[in-house]
Amino acid sequence: MLDRVDLRGVDDIASRLPRPEPISADSVAAVRKIIDAVRAGGDAALARFTQQFDAAVPPSWRVPPQELAAASDRIDSDLKSALQAAADSIAEFHQGRLSPERTHCHQGISIRSWDQPVGRAGCYVPGGRAAYPSTVLMTALPARAAGVGRVVLCVPPGPGGRVADVTLAAAAVAGVDEVYAVGGAQAIAALAYGTESVAAVDVIVGPGNVYVAVAKQLVAGEVGVPAAFSGPSEVVVVADGTTPASYAAIDLIVQAEHGPDGLAWLVTWDIEAAGAIEAAVAELLTTAARRDDILATFSRSGNTVLVDGPEAAAEVVNLIAPEHLQIMTGDPEAITGRVHHAGAIFCGSLSPASIGDYLAGPSHVLPTGGTARFAGALGVRDFVKPMHEITVTPEGLAAVGPHVATLATAEGLEAHARSIHLRGVGGTRPERGRR
């Protein structure tokens, strides 16, 4: 079920560590074909791919706005309260996280800098296997905190072409402006390029399967896309002899139940703990509702990695750069100080990743596929662009103008240098118009 990888006594851990298979060229080509078709064919292409992949085409791509409020009335009161509690926690975390406007003055040059929110943000929320109202909150609320003008949501339609009530209710709680019943790579293409029914956006965020993640990479440059690759779910659990076996086991299962193509690793230096946790995984699987999805993840990338100690465990973590890292040892600080690459870190046996998935506050849209080496959780900064304005005084022009002219001349850009000289600095005096 979990394959054993014994790295005890190994000096070059990187060379012995199993690595996930790269995304196939065929998958990339298939996604590119969908994007090109939607860009050229608009709504007609959306209908063709939605029928092919979701077996249902909605009566209209946009969900009527009144349906959001109606869906909120149809869901259970406890669920409505949970959505609001999660929304409050997420919104509170993200509020105020933008950089304040600042002014920098030096040598007569004044530079005012600020964060400018984009006009339209597209939030992708997966569907098909399940409804994910939490992802609605985790994408739309950071956009709202950033001050985005209009927040747009795309989600695959379910039976009959409808979007689940709980997803629409979450959209209402998060203040989403537009909801479209379309998913997959075709939704990413629609958000990037627009169709007759879906207006293009400035930024696309949100997790998805490999095809959705690849689609976002392919449209990057035409539209803003966070650096993180938000693909199939990943977890690394670091455990020792103090770790309750059932806690570690269920937390491996939690991320694996998202389905195939993910990653679930146990890392430990305690052989007895490894055996106890593996046995607990097997026991919990006997009653797991999504057993097939869990086994699919384990069969692709489910491993128990045996190492010499905390330092080697941290090295494994940094090489994998997992989306979720759970450090469930007796001394988590012995590892956390050595971890440099992870999407989100959960410390202690009472801090399951599921808390972060729903209600802690930071977005659960996290880097996967090793992109935690250079990217982090989705946040308000993914919905803004830094802007600045420069004002130069006469004293500032006199102070820096000669250097600018010298540098421009060295680069062979005569007009750049002349733009300084014409202002009476470092060369020819300003030319006067003819009389």
Image (spheres, rainbow, N blue to C red):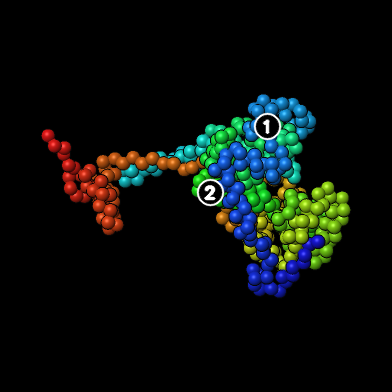
Q: Position of residue 169 (x, y in %)?
A: 70, 32
Q: Residue at x 60, y 37 (%)?
A: 43
Q: In the rendered view, would you say 143 is above or below 410?
A: above
| Image x and y of residue 401, in percent | 26, 48
Please identify the quarter of the rendering in which residue 335 is found: bottom right
Residue behind mark 2: 220
The location of residue 358, given as percent across then percent down, is 71, 42
Kindly identify which numbered label has been placed on residue 282. Answer: none
Looking at the image, can residue 290 be seen? yes
* Residue type of the residue flagged with mark 1: Pro
Q: Residue furthest left?
A: 435
Residue in front for this viewpoint, 178 or 365 = 178
Instruction: State which quadrant residue 395 falls in.
Output: top left
Q: Which mark is residue 59?
A: 1
Query: CA gap, disc 2 to disc 1?
Result: 30 Å
Q: Residue at x 76, y 33 (%)?
A: 79
Of the two numbered discs 2 and 1 on the same chain, state the one appearing first in sequence.
1
Residue drawn at point x = 13 percent, y = 37 percent: 434
Instruction: Tell how many labels.
Output: 2
Instruction: Give the camera-side residue of 72 and 102.
Output: 72
Callout 2: SS: loop
Q: Position of residue 217 (x, y in %)?
A: 57, 51
Q: Is residue 190 left or right of residue 434?
A: right
Above/below status of 415 relative to 61:
below
Quadrant position of the C terminus in the picture = top left
Q: Amino acid at mark 2?
A: Ala
